[in-house]
Amino acid sequence: SSSSSSSSVPDRAARYQAAAMDATLGGAKQTGRIQDTHYLGGGQWDYCRDMAKMAQLYNSDMEDFIRTNQAIYEHSGQERASSPPGSEDNYRETRYKRNYGTGGGFEVLSSGISSAVESSASSSS
């Protein structure tokens, strides 16, 4: 049975059209490679906001959560970028603590990059 509702979900034809465009345009990277349709890069934060708004969950706490995710993502990216190609992926060992209830933000509890550098320095002494 079908009933009318005030849903803002596009109709099936519009969803299929959007999916076809995503599949052929290459997603956020615009490379034309279907493999890249999942990659949002920096566009993921606005996407998260849009999803939270559609679910009627968006508020200041959600914004703090999204901003903290973005800050951790960017910090991890900086650590990853500082590693030479082919080296161990020590950045994956970095541990974070979210600061809930304080407007967001995070602390680095331990840095995989710092630990690897300290370990390397002590073993070469």
Image (cartoon, helix red, strand yellow):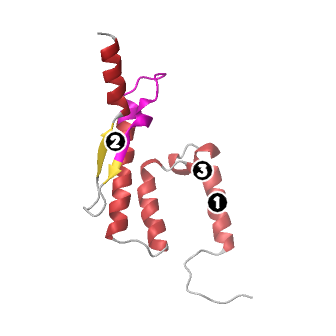
Residue at 35 percent of width and 36 percent of height: 78
Residue toward you, 123 or 94:
123
Mark 3 neighbour density, 10 Å: few (under 14) some (14–19) many (20 or more): some
* Residue 61 on the magenta span: no
Q: Disc 3 or 2, which lies upstream in sequence? A: 3
| Amino acid type at mark 1 | Ala
* Residue 83 on the magenta span: yes
Residue toward you, 85 or 72:
72
User: Would you place residue 102 above or below residue 119 in this image?
Assistant: below
Residue 106 place in picture, x, y as percent:
30, 50
User: Would you place residue 120 above or below residue 92 in this image?
Assistant: above
Q: Disc 1 or 3, which lies upstream in sequence? A: 1
Instruction: Name the residue carrying label 1.
Output: 19
Instruction: Name the residue carrying label 2.
Output: 75
Residue at 31 percent of width and 42 percent of height: 109
Residue 103 place in picture, x, y as percent:
26, 62
Distance, label 3 to label 2, CA atoms, is 29 Å
Instruction: Name the residue carrying label 3.
Output: 25
The extreme top residue here reads 125
Q: Secondary structure at mark 2?
A: helix
Distance, label 1 to label 2, CA atoms, is 32 Å
| Amino acid type at mark 3 | Leu
Q: Disc 1 or 2, which lies upstream in sequence? A: 1
Residue at 29 percent of width and 9 percent of height: 125
The extreme right residue here reads 1
The segment highlighted magenta reads: 79-96
